[in-house]
Image (tube, rainbow, N blue to C red):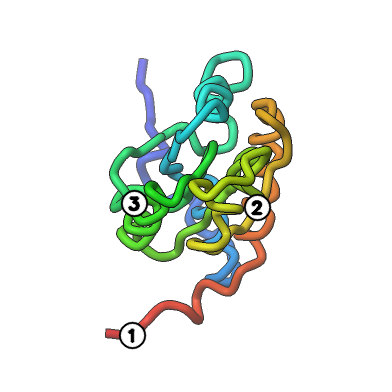
Amino acid sequence: MVTTNTEIAYNSKIEGEVIVSRMDSIINWIRTNSMWPMPMGLACCAIELMGTASSRFDIARFGAEVMRFSPRQSDCMIVAGTVTYKMASAVRRIYDQMAEPKWVIAMGACASSGGMYRSYATLQGVDHIVPVDVYISGCPPRPEALLDALMKLQAKVRHERSATNLRRA
């Protein structure tokens, strides 16, 4: 019995097909499907953030299951909970250490607007110290809301101009 392996040799069906696309589209496709969140769990919203990574909600379907606790390895900060003035400088420092491009999701009423805390110690919205891309309402918001915010952020990233932002060395 003689077997021939034709797949190892030149195959015009495989090598003759070329996919043409814009560089922006390819880079943004990679970015949308491999977001690495930096969880800033500051209060009760952090429990819902942890629940999003569980098997019931499975944030891995969206390419964001790699929660990194190092700002240099993450590109999407999820601020979940109440930001006090004491923590504001730490949140800003961690944001500054993240590599470009970077995005921010404000999770919950406290991160978005200070929530029910109208006191001298509570920052009235994390957007006072870092630029926020997507806001999630609720106290605390459900894991489905975080998944929805992640999909909205992915849609935003999908339409960014990325190739023009590359610097030539």
Residue 142 in picture, x, y percent from top left: 69, 26
| C-alpha span from label 2 to label 1 | 30 Å
Q: At 66% from the left edge and 65% from the top edge, which residue is drawn? A: 159
Q: Amino acid at mark 1?
A: Arg
Please state, as top left, top right, bottom left or bottom right, where the C terminus lies in the image: bottom left
Q: Earlier in the sequence, mark 3 or mark 2?
A: 3
Q: Nearer the viewer, residue 42 or 160?
A: 42
Q: Which residue is mark 2?
A: 134
Q: Nearer the viewer, residue 106 or 69?
A: 106
Camera sees residue 60: no
Residue under circle 1?
168
Q: Image height check: is 70 above or below 2?
A: below
Q: Mark 3 against mark 2, which lies toward the viewer?
A: 3
User: How far apart, in angstroms, are the residues tagged by discs 1 and 3?
Assistant: 32 Å
> Circles 1 and 3: CB distance less than 8 Å?
no
Tell me whether circle 2 and circle 1 mark residues in contact (CB < 8 Å). Answer: no
Q: In the picture, residue 66 is in which quadrant?
A: top left
Helix, strand or loop at disc 3?
helix
Q: Residue at x 60, y 60 (%)?
A: 157
Q: Is residue 121 visible?
A: yes
Quadrant where the N terminus lies?
Answer: top left
Q: Residues within 10 Å of mark 2 (few under 14, many from 20)?
A: many
Q: Residues within 10 Å of mark 1 (few under 14, many from 20)?
A: few
Residue 90 bears which disc, if any?
3
92 w.r.t. 110: above or below: below
Which amino acid type is shown beneath numbered disc 3? Ala
Hey, which quadrant is residue 81 in on the image?
top right
Element type at mark 2: strand
Q: Position of residue 87 (x, y in %)?
A: 39, 47
Q: Earlier in the sequence, mark 1 or mark 3?
A: 3
Q: Nearer the viewer, mark 1 or mark 3?
A: 3
